[in-house]
Image (cartoon, rainbow, N blue to C red):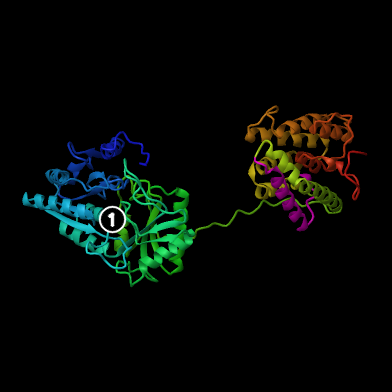
């Protein structure tokens, strides 16, 4: 079965892709009659060396994404995974020569078709009197024994584009650029790993992998690698890759050792998620630095893909200060990242957490008694929630994901652990604030956020006063915060509904002479859908929100050691 691709036609997909890139970038132009993209300011290159590269399509953003001042002058694209035509390569060479450049360097990845076609175009151009040199890049570190064809050209070629571009921009001559980039290429290695294959439009996947296998050392056209290994952690995979790349018995190894300074490139082969790419980059940094290797620059992103292949490649380039200046040189190429011009290794990667605001001290004598009462109430709330865990989960399974009891039990255990650390604050505002932070950090889910919002907002009116009107205002503030950020309103059949009903009853506390227990009794009964005449003991409620109400109102806790019930 062929794979699904968003194309107009299999035959025209390479032309359409290049046309789309040029259409969206005013710095690029197409060469009429050819699948060639060139800098739109070609005439500004008079007296300088032109740089041309290319190869099969399907490796985007390579190669056209690296056209720009300080990188490539143009690229010649073939069909997907197919070398470009000799005629198009020659046309590109002629175009840059006729624009007044003093010579052309062809940067070619080491594949037979590319070597042949670019080589033939070079010979034809030289026969016409155009100065042309060609460097063939082979940076693959997969093979322990070199084949006759040599090392394959992989993502490290992009670094050669950058180095050559910086040299050309500085006015260096053709032969000198060719000489310098050839030396740079010898100090570079790349190794790829994939979780899956890729498929050329209109075709089946190039190979199959079992669910527990990954391919090590594969090429960028879906060619098989050197071996298949079992799926492992990111750290284990990176360690294995670095061992293979730097093993001196490996004929294609990169000579990186303790004390070396490198440019590191972590390249997405097309289908890896950004989350996974970040994990692999972190593993590579830690592993290299753990081996005493200095990472002078780090590039992470998609530079040379293999269509939708889910995998990545790791490139290491030995770098000294002169080379880093070339890597750091300015470029307008759209796909080159904004790389920090400082070393990755040795940089401080974390900042101390901000200090907590200083809290006003609680009163001592009265505070101690209030703290004991609050501890008893919170312990009862927690015990009740823990006892109802399975019942609440069962109720939640009928309408949700079945974790209501688990979520509230997690909150209860967090509160129990907190209480063991010492008595809670006697100040109602401080208590609610502490509970808010605890639930936000430990409870998780939307419940933790909603309770945290409610308690944070409710604490504010209680900073100045703790009389009955202040407690009513606290309820109002908590409900307002829940509505503002949770986007629920009374009547939406959410946890807000019953809290809202209770809040309406607590409005009576704002009236002079309001009876504390009469109002609170009615509020909690309304909260549970009971008539105001019903008999109720708070500890018997099955709804977690009831226990929130119990914890909210310290005026209700009259006598230490007595059952918490709605009686005077």
Q: Position of residue 4 (x, y in %)?
A: 37, 39
Q: Which residues are magenta?
A: 401-428
Give the main secondary structure of the magenta stretch. Answer: helix
Residue nearest the observer in this picture, 6 or 326: 6
Quadrant containing the C terminus in the rendered view:
top right
Q: Does residue 315 sit above or below 428 in this rendering? A: below
Quadrant containing the N terminus in the rendered view:
top left
Q: Residues within 10 Å of mark 1 (few under 14, many from 20)?
A: many
> Which residue shows up at 26% across the image and 53% down it?
161
Q: Position of residue 59 (x, y in %)?
A: 31, 48
Q: Does residue 208 sit above or below 176 in this rendering? A: above
Whether residue 285 can be seen here? no
Q: Position of residue 126 (x, y in %)?
A: 9, 52
Residue nearest the observer in this picture, 73 or 458: 73
Residue nearest the observer in this picture, 303 or 393: 393
Position of residue 384 in the picture relative to residue 243 (left or right)? right
Q: Which residue is mark 1?
A: 157
Position of residue 131 in the picture relative to residue 307 (left or right)? left
Residue extending furthest toward the right: 568
Q: Is residue 399 magenta?
A: no
> Which residue shows up at 36% across the image and 39% down it?
5
State the image quarter where residue 519 is shown.
Answer: top right
Q: Does residue 8 sit above or below 278 in this rendering? A: above
Q: Secondary structure at mark 1?
A: helix
Q: Is residue 409 magenta?
A: yes
Position of residue 89 in the picture relative to residue 10 (left or right)? left
């Amino acid at each position: 079965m062929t794979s699904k691709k968003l194309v107009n036609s299999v035959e025209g997909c390479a032309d359409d892709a290049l046309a789309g890139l040029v259409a969206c970038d005013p710095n690029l132009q197409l060469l009429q009659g050819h699948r060639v993209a060139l800098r739109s300011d070609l005439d500004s290159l008079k007296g300088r060396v032109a740089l041309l590269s290319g190869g099969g399509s399907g490796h985007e953003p390579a190669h056209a994404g690296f056209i720009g001042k300080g990188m490539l002058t143009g690229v010649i694209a073939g069909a997907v995974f197919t070398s470009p035509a000799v005629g198009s390569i020659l046309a590109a060479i002629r175009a840059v020569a006729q624009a007044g450049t003093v010579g052309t360097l062809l940067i070619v990845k080491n594949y037979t078709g590319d070597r042949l076609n670019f080589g033939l175009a070079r010979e034809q151009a030289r026969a016409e009197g155009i100065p042309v040199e060609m460097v063939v890049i082979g940076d693959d570190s997969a093979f322990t024994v070199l084949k006759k064809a040599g090392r394959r050209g992989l993502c490290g070629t992009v670094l050669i584009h950058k180095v050559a571009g910086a040299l050309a921009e500085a006015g260096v001559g053709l032969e000198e650029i060719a000489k310098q980039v050839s030396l740079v290429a010898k100090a570079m290695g790349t190794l790829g790993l994939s979780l899956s294959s890729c498929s050329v439009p209109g075709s089946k996947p190039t190979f199959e992998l079992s669910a527990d296998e990954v391919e090590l050392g594969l090429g960028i056209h879906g060619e098989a690698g050197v071996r298949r290994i079992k799926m492992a952690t990111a750290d284990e995979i990176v360690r294995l890759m670095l061992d293979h790349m730097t093993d001196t018995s490996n004929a294609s190894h990169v000579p990186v050792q303790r004390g070396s300074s490198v440019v590191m490139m972590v390249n997405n082969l097309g289908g890896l998620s950004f989350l996974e790419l970040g994990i692999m980059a972190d593993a590579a940094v830690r592993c290299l630095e753990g081996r005493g290797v200095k990472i002078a620059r780090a590039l992470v992103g998609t530079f040379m893909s293999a269509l939708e292949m889910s995998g990545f490649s790791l490139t290491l380039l030995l770098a000294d200060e002169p080379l880093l200046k070339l890597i750091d040189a300015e470029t307008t190429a759209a796909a080159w990242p904004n790389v920090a011009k400082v070393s990755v290794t040795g940089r401080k990667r974390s900042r101390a957490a901000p200090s907590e605001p200083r809290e006003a001290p609680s009163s001592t004598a009265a505070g101690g008694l209030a703290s004991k009462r609050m501890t008893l109430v919170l312990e009862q709330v927690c015990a009740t929630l823990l006892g109802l865990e399975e019942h609440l989960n069962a109720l939640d399974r009928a309408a949700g994901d079945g974790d209501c009891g688990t979520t509230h039990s997690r909150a209860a255990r967090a509160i129990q652990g907190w209480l063991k650390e010492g008595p809670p604050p006697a100040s109602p505002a401080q208590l609610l604030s502490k509970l808010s932070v605890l639930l936000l950090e430990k409870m998780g889910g939307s419940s933790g956020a909603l309770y945290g919002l409610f308690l944070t907002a409710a604490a504010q009116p209680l900073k100045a006063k703790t009389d009955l009107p202040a407690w009513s205002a606290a309820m109002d503030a908590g409900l307002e915060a829940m509505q503002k950020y949770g986007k629920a309103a009374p009547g939406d059949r959410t946890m807000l509904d019953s809290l809202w009903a209770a809040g309406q009853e607590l409005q009576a506390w704002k009236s002079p002479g309001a009876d504390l227990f009469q109002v609170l009794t009615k509020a909690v009964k309304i909260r549970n859908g009971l008539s105001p005449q019903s008999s109720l003991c708070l500890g018997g409620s099955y709804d977690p929100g009831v226990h929130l109400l119990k914890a909210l109102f310290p005026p209700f806790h009259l006598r230490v050691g007595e059952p918490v019930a709605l009686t005077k």
